[in-house]
Image (cartoon, grey):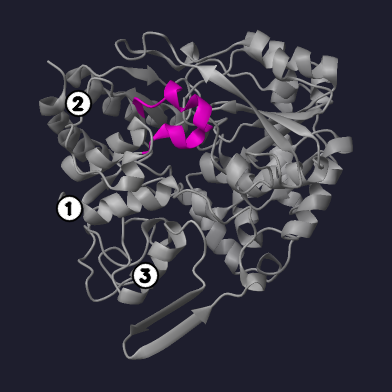
Amino acid sequence: MRGSSCCCDNGSRRPNNPANPNITHVGGRNFFNCPRMSAFAAPTRPLARKLAVAAVISPTPPTSLRTTTRGLCATMSLSSKLKPAARVSGQKQDVWSIINEAAAASPKQPIVNMGQGFFGYNPPRFILDAAKEALERVDCNQYSPTKGRPRLKKAIADSYSPHWGRAIDPETEVTITTGANEGMLSAFMAFLEDGDEVIIFEPFFDQYVGSKRVEMNGDMPGGKIVYVPLHPPATGATTTSSAADWTVDFDELERAITPKTKMIVINTPHNPVGKVFSKDELQKIADLCVKNEIIILSDEVYDKLYYVPFTRIATLSPEVERLTLTVGSAGKNFYATGWRVGWLIGPEHLIKYVAAAHTRICYSSVSPLQEACAVGFEQADAHGFWDATITEMKGKMDRFNAVWEELGLPYSEPEGGYFVLVNMAQVRLPADYPFPAHVASRPRDFKLAWFLIQEVGVAAIPPTEFYTDENTHLAEDYIRFAVCKEDSVLEEAKNRLRGLKKYMAK
């Protein structure tokens, strides 16, 4: 597909960089929806432009829209019965569409994408071969059992049992989901009802709120979120420090617990901070959950990418394990985010209800890729894959972060995962810079992200997207970069980022 056309191409598109799909020209359809997953793109046809504006900028859906393209006249009218539900209408423009818009408008083409956390390279050959072989099998092209293919469940149980210190039962303690995202949705749907409260640490992966049936204002069926922030290091604007220095105020956490608290969500290694919660921190969280009988939903999708000792909260004690659902992701483990294969591990009295919710959401998950993931687990150790994964990603992280040392910009040194938060308080944005109104009204990190794309041609993500409005001040000087890219992309990004020097405070 590199350098060729695809379903998102149109006449205005310039070819991709054939050497690397992460460095590419603008054209065609919206980048984050493009199956090529490689180009920032903007709608170029008149109809597409008008629909995009109506969809992401209008606070309420248009009642009538009449446009013409290629001689085709289309009229759409929305009666009150056809208007969308309040849970999806009237929301402010999301970060992904803003980044797309900035990329489309930037004179610095092609854009280097260091924003979204998809890999810039393929899974290892032994896993790709397993996927190809599975496609030749009749049973792998049909529905899988709703709880997952037996081979994959067994492979996961065998892989994780040593960490648990006991044999995990693949039939009753593992369920397969369509990505970790749907797995967490299944957990929310399985246990949350109106009036229940869920504690989530800020910053949070945006999908916890956006698609998990829990709503910021608490008015969506399925629970109310209570936010507890991770506190950044006080010297974050001047000194590089460990991501461990983003800390939990445990008195604040305990005050957030009420008789209505049903669940707490933790993410370790953490996106976007890169923090690996210490054993002591996890024990304090677990003690509160045991005391108040709170379900622990532990998002551990980066559990194979840790650079310091990593503790799984479910392994602390039988009392904690009884309350814990652990979430995993083949996409993160095997460099295959598009495969959408995830799982949950937990005690039978919790897992069976997650599996029941999953059945109602999507019934079963993609069969041939489940089989390939099973082979991945079965053969990973023999190929030295897990150790190589850590070594390679830590190498990418260190090589990329060298540019911040050059520039004198402090960052939070990640303990795990593939994201890094960089503090750009020293970058001076011109007072008269022409930010669009919907960017100018957002926190400073949105302006920084727009500025980076326009002036140096590097896309990154503003982390206040992962905060409630009250706490955006904690992260408005930070920007998130993803290093899970080819080394050539990292080097090109570094070359461009050196251009920030002229905008930095003397």
**Disc 1 vs disc 2: which is toward the camera?**
2
- Where are the magenta residues, as a range? 461-478
Q: Position of residue 110 (x, y in %)?
A: 20, 52
Above or below, 81 relative to 195: below
Q: CA distance from mark 1 to mark 3?
A: 24 Å
Q: Which residue is mark 2?
A: 428
Looking at the picture, tell me which residue is in the foreground, 227 or 288.
Answer: 227
Looking at the picture, tell me which residue is in the foreground, 162 or 268.
Answer: 268
Dot 2 alpha-carbon crowd within 10 angstroms: few under 14, some 14 to 19, many 20 or more:
some
Label annotation for residue 50? 3
The residue most toward the right is 349
Above or below, 226 relative to 148: above
Above or below, 4 relative to 307: below
Q: Check if residue 464 falls in the magenta segment.
A: yes
Looking at the picture, tell me which residue is in the foreground, 236 or 277.
Answer: 236
- Secondary structure category for the residue under label 3: helix
Residue 323, image quadrant: top right
